[in-house]
C-alpha cells in the first residue's frame, strides 16, 4: 500500500469519524452526543471528498450537519434535557452479544481486506466525473427519475403525516353550560335556585366565571368527576 | 524557481502564502469595517464617534484588539467549560473557511511569477462549500448560548438558530436562479461568465435575477444577525444574547466572526450578482491579463464589497428592530415564496428561450 498524502487524510478523518461515533454513544449528555454526531457527519463528508465526490460531500455537510442536526440540537436546547443519571445495567446479557457482533464485523472487514483482495478500481484516480454536481443532477433527472420522484412523494407523505399528527384538534371553547356535551340531558341554562354570585341564576353567554361556577355546582350535585 | 513552483510542494507553499495574504487582507478589512461602522453610525446619529487614536481614529481597531487581549479571561462558574471554550472557535473557524474560494481578481501577470489567477482554490462545488460551512457556523452561536448557563444566552442562542435555519432556505433558493443561468457552482467560472459588454452581462440584469438579488440581500442580513434582524442579541431584551457571558478574547472572536460573515455575504452578493471583479470598460484602458488590469479589477471587487458593507451599516443606522413573530412571518410567508417564484420563473424562461438568457 502506497503511503501518500491522501492516505494520511483518510486516517485522520476516518479516525475522527470513529472517535466521534464512539463519543456519541458513550456520552451521558444528550447535547454532547448530538455535537459528536455532527463531528461524524463532517468527517464522513471529508471522506467523500477523498473519494472525489465533492457534491456528495457538500450535501452530506449541508443536509446532515447543517440542517438535521441543527434541529436536533435546537430541540435539546429547547427542552433543556438533563444529564442522564447512570443507571444500573439491566440488560447485562447484551454485553457479550455486542462483543460477538463486533468480532463478526472485524472478521468481515479482515476477510474483505485479505482473502477477497482489494478492488483494483481506485475511485480516487478513476471515474473522476461520478461525484460532480452535473453528473449527479443528470443522473437524478434522467436515469433515476422514477426512484427520485417516488422518494420525494415518500418524504411528502411523511411531512403531511407529521403535520396531521401535530395539528391541534379544533375544540370550540365552551361559552355556556349548553356548549358542554353531556350524557343525555345537557346542562340547564337556568339554574333552579339562586347561585352564590349569579343573583337570579340565569347564566349569561360569555360570562365565564359564572359559567364555571354553575358547571362546578351542577357537577357536584350530580357527583361526577370533572375531568372525563 | 518556476520549476519548483510546479511541484506539489511548491504548489502547496504557494497556496499557503495565498491563504495567509487573503486572511490578512480580509481581517484588515473586517477591522476597519468595525471602525467604519462606529464612525458612520455616529455620523448618522449626529455624533463624532471614535476619533482620538491616530489621525481620525485610524488606529482604533488595534487599540481595541490590544484591549481585548489584555482583558481578564472570565468564565461563569456553572458554564459547561469545554463547550463554552469550543463555541467561539467554531464560530470564527466557520467564518474564515470560505475565504479560500473567493475570486479576488482575474488572471493577471504578477512580477517574477507570470500569470496567476487571484483565487486560492477553484473546485466544482465552491458555492455549496460556502453555504455548507456557514450552515455549520450556526453551532458556534447555539453552543455558546447553551453552554453559558444563563437565561439570556439560552434565549439568544435559540432565537439565533431558529432565525438562521429559517432564512437559510430563502438565502439558498435565491441563489438557485443564478446557478441555473450559469450552469456551474464554481464561483470563478460564474464571475468569468459575467465579463464583457460593459456590465450588462452581470447576473442582476439577466432574467429575473433582480428578484433573487433582493431576496438574497434581505436573507443575508438575517443570516448575519444584523439590524433589523438582530433579535439574537437584542440588547433591550437579552442584554447581549448568546455572547452575554463571554469576555475578553472569546468575545472578540464572536465579534470578528460576525463581521467576517458580513464580509462573506457581501462577497457572495458581489460575485453572484454584480459581476465580481469585472469593472465595466476597464478593457478599453488596459490590456486584459496585464498587471494594471488585474490591479484595477481587484480594486473594483473590493469597492463593490465595501459598498455592501456600507449598505449594512447604513441599514443599522436607519431601521428599527423587527418583532420575532414578524421576523418569522416575513421569512416563511413572504421571502420563501418569492424565492421559489424566482426559481420557477427562471427555469421556465430558460426552457422556453434558452438562447436569450445564456
Image: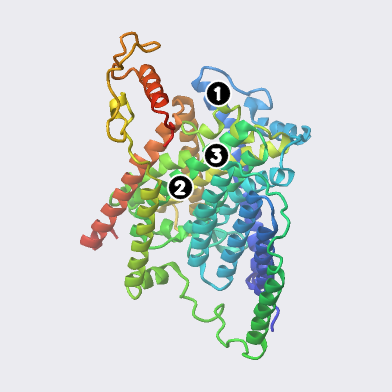
* Quadrant assignment, res A135: bottom left
Residue B26 horizontal/vertical position (percent): 60, 46
Above or below for B162 versus A15:
above
Q: Secondary structure at mark 1?
A: helix
Residue B91 horizontal/vertical position (percent): 62, 46
The residue at 66%/51% (across/down) is A32
Whether callout 3 and callout 2 share a subunit is answered: yes
Q: Marks 3 and 2, Cα distance to the nearest angstrom?
A: 15 Å
Q: What is the count of numbered marks?
A: 3
The residue indicated by pointer 3 is B158
* B296 and B142: which is toward the camera: B142
Of all residues shown, which one is farthest toward the top? A199
- Report the disc number at residue B236: 1
Marks 2 and 1 close (CB-CB < 8 Å) = no
Residue B136 horizontal/vertical position (percent): 56, 51
The residue indicated by pointer 2 is B168
Of all residues shown, which one is farthest toward the left? B352
Whether callout 3 and callout 1 share a subunit is answered: yes
Task: Give left or right: position of A125 versus A12.
Answer: left
Q: Secondary structure at mark 3?
A: helix
The residue at 42%/25% (across/down) is A220
Q: Secondary structure at mark 2?
A: helix
Identify the mark nearer the N-term, 3 or 2: 3
Q: Chain of mark 1?
A: B
* Quadrant assignment, res A2: bottom right
Q: Chain of mark 2?
A: B
Amino acid at each position: 500500500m502506497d503511503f501518500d498524502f491522501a492516505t494520511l487524510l483518510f486516517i485522520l478523518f476516518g479516525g475522527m469519524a470513529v472517535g466521534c461515533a464512539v463519543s456519541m454513544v458513550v456520552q451521558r449528555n444528550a447535547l454532547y452526543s448530538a455535537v459528536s454526531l455532527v463531528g461524524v457527519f463532517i468527517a464522513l463528508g471529508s471522506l467523500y471528498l477523498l473519494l472525489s465526490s465533492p457534491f456528495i460531500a457538500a450535501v452530506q455537510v449541508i443536509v446532515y450537519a447543517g440542517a438535521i442536526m441543527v434541529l436536533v440540537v435546537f430541540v435539546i436546547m429547547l427542552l433543556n434535557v438533563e444529564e442522564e443519571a447512570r443507571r444500573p445495567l439491566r440488560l447485562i446479557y447484551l454485553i457479550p452479544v455486542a462483543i460477538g457482533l463486533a468480532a463478526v464485523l472485524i472478521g468481515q472487514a479482515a476477510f474483505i481486506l485479505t482473502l477477497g483482495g482489494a478492488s483494483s478500481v481506485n475511485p480516487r484516480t478513476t471515474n473522476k466525473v461520478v461525484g460532480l454536481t452535473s453528473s449527479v443532477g443528470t443522473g437524478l433527472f434522467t436515469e433515476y427519475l422514477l426512484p427520485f420522484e417516488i422518494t420525494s412523494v415518500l418524504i411528502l407523505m411523511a411531512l403531511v403525516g407529521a403535520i396531521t399528527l401535530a395539528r391541534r384538534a379544533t375544540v370550540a371553547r365552551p361559552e355556556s353550560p349548553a356548549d358542554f356535551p353531556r350524557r343525555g340531558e345537557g346542562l340547564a341554562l337556568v339554574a333552579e335556585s339562586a347561585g352564590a354570585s349569579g343573583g337570579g341564576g340565569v347564566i349569561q353567554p360569555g360570562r365565564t366565571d359564572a359559567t364555571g361556577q354553575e358547571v362546578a355546582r351542577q357537577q357536584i350535585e350530580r357527583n361526577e368527576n370533572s375531568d372525563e | 524557481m518556476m520549476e519548483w513552483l510546479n511541484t506539489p510542494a511548491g504548489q502547496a507553499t504557494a497556496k499557503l502564502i495565498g491563504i495567509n495574504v487573503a486572511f490578512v487582507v480580509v481581517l484588515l478589512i473586517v477591522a476597519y469595517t468595525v471602525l467604519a461602522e462606529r464612525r458612520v453610525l455616529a455620523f448618522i446619529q449626529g455624533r463624532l464617534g471614535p476619533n482620538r487614536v491616530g489621525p481620525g481614529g485610524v488606529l482604533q481597531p488595534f487599540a481595541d484588539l490590544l484591549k481585548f487581549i489584555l482583558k481578564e479571561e472570565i468564565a461563569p462558574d456553572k458554564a459547561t467549560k469545554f463547550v463554552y471554550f469550543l463555541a467561539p472557535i467554531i464560530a470564527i473557524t466557520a467564518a474564515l473557511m470560505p475565504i479560500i474560494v473567493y475570486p479576488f481578481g482575474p488572471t493577471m501577470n504578477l512580477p517574477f511569477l507570470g500569470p496567476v489567477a487571484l483565487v486560492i482554490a477553484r473546485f466544482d462545488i465552491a458555492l455549496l462549500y460556502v453555504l455548507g460551512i456557514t450552515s455549520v457556523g450556526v453551532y458556534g452561536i447555539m453552543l455558546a448560548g447553551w453552554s453559558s448557563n444563563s437565561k439570556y444566552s439560552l434565549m439568544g442562542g435559540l432565537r439565533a438558530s431558529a432565525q438562521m435555519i429559517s432564512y437559510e432556505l430563502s438565502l439558498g433558493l435565491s441563489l438557485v436562479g443564478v446557478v441555473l443561468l450559469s450552469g456551474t457552482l464554481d464561483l470563478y467560472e460564474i464571475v468569468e461568465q459575467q465579463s464583457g459588454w460593459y456590465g450588462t452581462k452581470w447576473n442582476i440584469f439577466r432574467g429575473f435575477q433582480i428578484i433573487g438579488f433582493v431576496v438574497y440581500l434581505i436573507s443575508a442580513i438575517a443570516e448575519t444577525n444584523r439590524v433589523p434582524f438582530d433579535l439574537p442579541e437584542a440588547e433591550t431584551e437579552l442584554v447581549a444574547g448568546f455572547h452575554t457571558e463571554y469576555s475578553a478574547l472569546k468575545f472578540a472572536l464572536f465579534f470578528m466572526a460576525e463581521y467576517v460573515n458580513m464580509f462573506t455575504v457581501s462577497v457572495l452578493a458581489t460575485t453572484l450578482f454584480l459581476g465580481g471583479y469585472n469593472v465595466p470598460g476597464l478593457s478599453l484602458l488596459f490590456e486584459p491579463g496585464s498587471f494594471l488590469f488585474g490591479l484595477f479589477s481587484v480594486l473594483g471587487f473590493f469597492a463593490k464589497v465595501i459598498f455592501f458593507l456600507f449598505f449594512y451599516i447604513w441599514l443599522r443606522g436607519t431601521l428599527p428592530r423587527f418583532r420575532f413573530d414578524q421576523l418569522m412571518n416575513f421569512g416563511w410567508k413572504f421571502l420563501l415564496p418569492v424565492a421559489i417564484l424566482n426559481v420557477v420563473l427562471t427555469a421556465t424562461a430558460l426552457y422556453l428561450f434558452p438562447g436569450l438568457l445564456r
